[in-house]
Image (tube, helix red, strand yellow):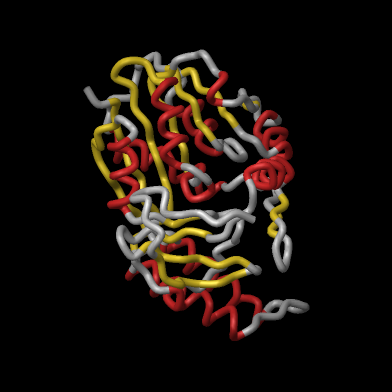
């Protein structure tokens, strides 16, 4: 375990924010970044990511599972962010941390002119993505020589030990006029009691507000083009889950617990109140 300071402003002034799975989250009192301190060593992080098992009081296990919800949502999100500018263009796209391939498959189906590939350190997720005919593997960014028009990093930011270094490496892989698309959860301005779900520490290492992500991008040589935010759970998705629990009451052999009804109702109320799924589109500056 190593002690770390805020990677955004460099301050070591912090206050307790939350505790989970034997790890502590602190909040930088200067810029508002929430991060794990102390955190695992880099070698331990690399091994945990590759195997999908993070040590703690209870192991955090990342199992490969293709998300139909994300796959269906991506075309609309891409239209929100890029309009029609992706249509018919022969672009090279690198999806870093592509997971099970949801974005890559959406690109393949809706933007066939785009040549896309994925970078994924988790071995099981690599295999699952490749089983869908997607080009997915792993390489070190610092050793990679190919150039791309667009790099995406969706649900990656909060897992990075050093986001400024990550964006610096991404900048070196973009061709002139290239862009980066970043997605992360915007929860740093909440309090822990507002969050009903597990934070999955130490898989997640930081939670950054929009101001911090913007600042890190700008310092890394990018100009922010646009920001869009969405609810964590689509309301219709939550209501469908609630309906299934209600149906269990009349279904032989099925059980429904009132605690789960309360959980869904809480998620529904939060989905209406908090918009946290943040996408930032940025372009090479200068």
Q: Quadrant of residue 98?
A: top right
Residue 247 point in image, percent of width and height: 61, 76
Residue farthest to the left? 286
Q: Residue shown at 70%/40% (left/top)?
A: 50
Name above or below for residue 12 compared with residue 93: below
Q: In this view, does 152 lie to the left or right of 212?
A: right
- Image quarter where the C terminus lies is top left
Residue 11 point in image, percent of width and height: 37, 56
Q: Is residue 251 left or right of residue 118?
A: right
Q: Residue shown at 73%/66% (left/top)?
A: 58
Looking at the picture, tell me which residue is in the foreground, 286 or 198: 286
Q: Residue shown at 29%/19% (left/top)?
A: 177
Residue 22 point in image, percent of width and height: 65, 69
Residue 187 point in image, percent of width and height: 39, 62
Name above or below for residue 24 compared with residue 216: below
Residue farthest to the right? 253
Name above or below for residue 139 compared with residue 273: above
Name above or below for residue 88 compared with residue 235: above
Q: Residue shown at 30%/37% (left/top)?
A: 219
- Image quarter where the N terminus lies is bottom right
């Amino acid at each position: 375990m190593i002690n770390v300071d805020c990677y955004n402003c460099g301050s070591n002034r912090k206050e307790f924010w939350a505790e989970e799975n034997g790890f502590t989250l602190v909040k930088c009192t200067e810029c508002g970044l929430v991060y794990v301190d102390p955190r695992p060593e880099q070698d331990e992080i690399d091994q945990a990511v590759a195997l999908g098992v993070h040590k703690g009081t209870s192991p955090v296990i990342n199992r490969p599972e293709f998300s139909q919800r994300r796959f269906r949502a991506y075309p609309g999100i891409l239209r929100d962010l890029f309009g029609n500018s992706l249509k018919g263009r022969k672009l090279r796209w690198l999806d870093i941390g592509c997971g099970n391939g949801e974005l890559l498959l959406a690109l393949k189906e809706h933007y066939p002119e785009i040549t896309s590939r994925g970078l994924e350190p988790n071995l099981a997720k690599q295999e699952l993505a490749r089983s869908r005919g997607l080009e997915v593997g792993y390489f070190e960014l610092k050793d990679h020589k190919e150039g791309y028009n667009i790099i995406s990093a969706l649900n990656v930011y909060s897992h990075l030990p050093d986001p400024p270094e990550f964006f610096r490496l991404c900048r070196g892989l973009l061709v002139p006029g290239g862009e980066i698309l970043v997605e992360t959860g915007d929860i740093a301005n909440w309090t822990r009691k507002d969050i009903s779900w597990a934070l999955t520490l130490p898989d997640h290492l930081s939670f950054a507000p929009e101001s911090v992500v913007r600042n890190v991008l700008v310092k890394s040589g990018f100009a922010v083009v646009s920001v869009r935010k969405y609810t964590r759970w689509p309301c219709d998705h939550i209501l469908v889950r609630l309906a299934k629990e209600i149906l269990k009451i009349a279904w032989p052999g099925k059980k429904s617990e009132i605690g789960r009804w309360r959980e869904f109702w809480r998620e529904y109320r939060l989905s209406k109140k908090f918009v946290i799924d943040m996408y930032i589109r940025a372009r090479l500056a200068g």
